[in-house]
Amino acid sequence: MTTTVTTRTVRYPADGLTMVGHLARPAGTGRRPAVLIGPEGPGLSDAVRHRADALAELGYLALAFDINGGRWIADPQEMLARALPLLDDPDRMRAIGHAALDVLHAEPRTDPDRIAAIGYGTGGAIALELGREGYPLRAIGTVNALVTGRPGEAANIRCPVWAGVGSEDPIMPADRRDAFAAEMQAAGVDWRLTVYGGAQHAFHHPTADHEVLPGVAHHPRHAARAWQDILALLAECLPISEPGPPTS
């Protein structure tokens, strides 16, 4: 069952920039479970905004947050010059994530005790850093974001973690997958890793193009599967309606 969705642009400060996010709200007036959605390195795209809208249709309050001050950085070298230092700085990533959380908490319809974070690439790494910091998320879901954290901090993650990656992703190769799995396992996290056979980096994004960066290509079938895996994670860990108390 779908609901009527309303959307608005939200501007807020983070990382010395004015971020431009996309907030999608389902119909009604009551509090709703909320989902942060982080974009890949180039920035917030229509594809990620549409995912926020799709979640709102299901009954979630969803914020697609920004990482580049309202810009989509099309030039690969400029994008890497922005993204790589950010990925090397957990505190900066956490600050960007907390700025987005502040937007969610300022929304009266957000249930502050029922928030999940999902993300793609850099946005997924930010979601993981919020977990490593110990923020009480209900679930973390990432695609193409197998970034390991500082030693020991994964033990602070309080929720299930799902990660998806393409088997042919040269940016997230087998050794990165192994390191991520080892980190999660050593920390006692409830984790899952799905490897999509034949998929390359950014396989989830409809405009991904290997001519822009080698090893980058859209894989429509696996993109749809990854989205369904994220929805299954949310249905399990952040259901639209919490079960009531048992009746006698």
Image (tube, rainbow, N blue to C red):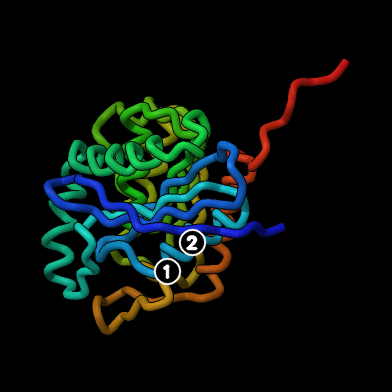
Residue 218 appearing in the image:
yes
The image quadrant where one finds the N terminus is bottom right
Q: Residues within 10 Å of mark 1 (few under 14, many from 20)?
A: some
Q: Foreground: 170 or 216?
A: 216
Tell me the tag on residue 47.
Answer: 1
Residue at disc 2, secondary structure: helix
Query: Which residue is at 47% across, 48% downward?
Result: 141
Q: Residues within 10 Å of mark 2 (few under 14, many from 20)?
A: some
Q: Where residue 44 sits in the image (x, y, percent)?
A: 32, 62
Distance between the alpha carbons at the discs numbered 2 and 1 = 6 Å
Tell me the tag on residue 51.
Answer: 2
Residue type beneath disc 1: Ala
Residue type beneath disc 2: Arg
Query: Which residue is at 27% across, 40% downward?
Result: 99
Query: Which residue is at 67% across, 59% downward?
Result: 2
Q: Where residue 132 sits in the image (x, y, percent)?
A: 34, 32
The image quadrant where one finds the C terminus is top right
Residue 175 appearing in the image:
no
User: Is mark 2 in CB contact (under 8 Å) with mark 1?
Assistant: yes
Q: Where residue 224 sits in the image (x, y, percent)?
A: 56, 68
Q: Residue furthest top?
A: 248
